Image (cartoon, rainbow, N blue to C red):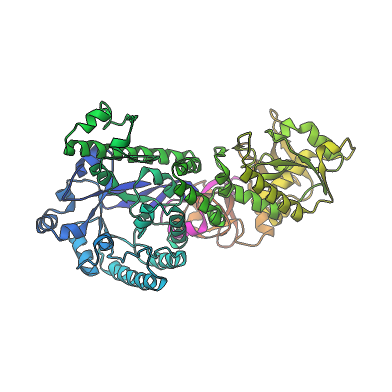
Amino acid sequence: MLEIVKRDGLARLCKFETRSGILKTPALLPVVNPKILIVTPKELYNEFGFRAIITNSYIIKNDTNLKNRAQTEGLHRMLDFPGIIMTDSGTFQSHMYGEVKVTNDEMIDFQKSIGTDIGTVLDIFTEPYWTREEVSRSVSETLERTRHACDIKGDMMINGVVQGSVYPDLREDCARKMATMNVDVHPIGGTVPLMEQYRYAELVDIIIASKKGLAAGRPVHLFGAGHPMILAFATLLGCDLFDSASYAKFARDDRFMFTDGTFRLNDIQFLDCNCPACRGNTLESIKKMDKKSRESIIARHNLYQITNELALIRRCIEEERLWELAEIRCRAHPALLDGLRRLRFYKDYLECKEPISRDRAIFYTGSESRARPAFHRYTERLLERYVPYFHKAAIFTDSKKPYSKYYASGFNRVRAAGYTPIIMSPFGPVPAELDEIYPIAQSLFPGIIDCDTNEDVKKMTDLFFEKVKFEEVISENEIKSGNIEYDTNQIRVRATAMYQFGPEATNALLHGKIDLVLSRKTGKVRNVISDGEHVLSMRANDGFYTLRPEGAKRIIELVPTPKFRAIVVDDAVPYILQGRNAFCQFVANMDPNIRPMEEIIVVDKDDNFVATGRAILTWDEIKSFKRGIAVKIRSGGSEV
C-alpha cells in the first residue's frame, strides 16, 4: 500500500508498506547476486541504509544448493537481510542469453516458496530493435501472464511489468491494462538497452507513456536504472523505485561512479571524494591493492554516491526544487540534455500534476527551464483568462523586480492615460496587475537572457497581442500624462481572480460593491469584501487567493457541480466540519481540472457546503490511493 507524504510535480516522497516493513521512496534496490557478494546484504542494510534489495530467483532456482537453502531457510535468512526483498524472474537473463527454460507459473510458485516480498512475472523483454508486430504479440503474452500471476500470487506482492519497446502507444496501452489488474508495483521494463546506448530522449517517451496509463496509487519502478547521474531526472519523471547491479559491475572493471559520469581508475587524475570508502586512500594506494580489495573499495564508493544522491533528491522534493537539481544533472551528458529537452513535448501532461504554487522561487538554469509546467500554465492561463482593464497597452522593457515597486510611477502614468502596463519578461508579457502571482514574482533569472528564451518570449508576445487585441500598443516612453481615474488594487483583485479561478467563478465571487482590506505594513490587498461578505483573502507568499466560506457558497450557488468541488461521503462530513482533513477513501468525486495545492470546496452529496481547503492530490490520484490526505481542510461550515 502506497501513501504520498510530499510531492514535487510527478516526483513524490511516499511510504510503501510491505509485509517486511515500510520503504520510503524514492529508493534504490541494489542488485544482489547470491553467488558473488562484493558487499553483503547485511552491510547494505547496516552500513549504507538500504531497506530493500533485489535478487534473481532464476539464478537461485537453477543452483541446487541455493535453491535448497532458500526453500528451507527462507530468502531473508539465507541472504541475512532483515529488510524488503524483491526478486526478478529470469526475464533479464532472456535478454542477455536467450530463452530461459522455465514457465511463468513455475517462477511465481518458486518465488512464493522462498518468501519473496515482491515477486516478478516472467514477462517478455521487448527489445528496441523488434518490429511493432513482434512487440505487440509479446506485450499480449506479458499481460496474459500477469493476469494469471495475480490469481496465484497469494500474499506475495507482484510486479506487473510494463513492456512495449520503443513504441509509446503500446507502452501506454500495456500500462492501462496492467493498472486494472491486482498488481502491487509497476516496473517499467526493457529500458536497459536504451540507457546503455544513451537514448535518453526515447527513455522519456517510454516513462511518460507508461505513467499516463499506470495507477497512481502504486509505486513505479524503473528497472535497471541505478547510476547516480540519472536518478534525479528519473525521479522528476515520476519513478519511485530503482535497481542496479552497476555498483558492483563497474567496480569489477575499476570504474568509479559519480553524478557527472563514470570514470576508470587509470584515467582519474585526482581522487576528490571524501566518502567513507575513499577517505584515507589515494589513487596510488587503491591501484596498489589486490584485485578483491580494490573491487570492494570501489563498490562501496559507488554505493555511497548512490545513497548521497538519493538523500539529496529527497531533500529537493521536500524543498520543492527537484526541477533545478534535475536540470543541473542533465548537463552532465549531451544525451541526458536531449532527455530534458524532450519534456517540451509533454507540457500539458506535466502541468496537470504541477502544484499551483510552491514555497520556493523558480531558479532559471537555461532555456530548458521554459519547458517547466509552471511556464506553460502561465502562458495558457494568460491567453485564456486575461481581460485587460484598459484597451490600450504600454510596453515596459526593463524588467527589474518587484515590478510594482520599481515602476510604480511609470505604471501610474500610463494608467492615468488609459493604458495597461505590460512588462516584457523572460515569462513573456506580464500585465502589471499580475506581477505578484506565482511564478512571476517568485522567480530568478540571469541578467543576460539566452537567444532561445528571447525567441520563445517573442513568439508568446505575438500570441498574446493577437489574442487580447489591444486597440493600440506603444512604448511607455511615448506616454506623457493623463487624468483617467482608476483603482490599482481593484484592477489587481479582479485580474488575479480571473487568472486563478476563471470568468465563471470570478463573476460569482465579485459582484456588487467591492471593498478591500489592505495590509497596514505593505499597503497590499489582504481581504476582499463583496457586498459586505468576506469572500477572498490574498496570500502574501504567492499572490493568490484563499477561498473563504462565503465565497465558496457563492460558487456553489452559481457554478455547476463538480467544478471547484470535492464531494465527500456522508460519514466524513461531521469530521471535516470539525476541521479534520478529507482523506482519499472518503472523496466520492472531484473536479478533474483541479491541480495540486489549488483552492477547493468540500461539499456533501447534495452539494451542500462543508468546508474549504487546498487539494493535495488530483482526482485520478485520489481514485487510486487507499490512504493519505486528499484535501487539506482550512475552514468548515461550523465556523460560520
Q: Total of numbered circles in the picture? A: 0
Residue 538 spot, x, y in % from top left:
66, 40
Nearest the eye: 223 or 573? 223
Which residues are the magenta region?
Answer: 618-640
- Please tell me in which quadrant of the rendered image residue 299 appears: top left
Left or right placement of residue 248 versus residue 585 in this view: left
Q: Can residue 506 be seen in this view?
A: no
- The N terminus lies in quadrant: bottom left
Q: Residue at x 26, y 25 (%)?
A: 280
Residue 438 spot, x, y in % from top left:
62, 42
- Please tell me in which quadrant of the rendered image residue 361 appears: top right
Q: Which residue is drawn at 33% across and 72% down?
A: 141
- Please tell me in which quadrant of the rendered image residue 284 appears: top left
Q: Residue at x 20, y 50 (%)?
A: 33
Left or right placement of residue 336 versus residue 63 in this view: right
- Please say if 610 is above or below 271: below
- Please say if 543 is above or below 121: above
Residue 72 spot, x, y in % from top left:
11, 56
Nearest the eye: 343 or 603? 343
Q: Is residue 215 visible?
A: yes
Tell me if residue 24 is in the magenta stretch: no
Tell me if residue 625 is in the magenta stretch: yes
- Please say if 84 is above or below 146: above
Q: Which residue lies furthest to the top in this view?
A: 280
Residue 341 spot, x, y in % from top left:
52, 50
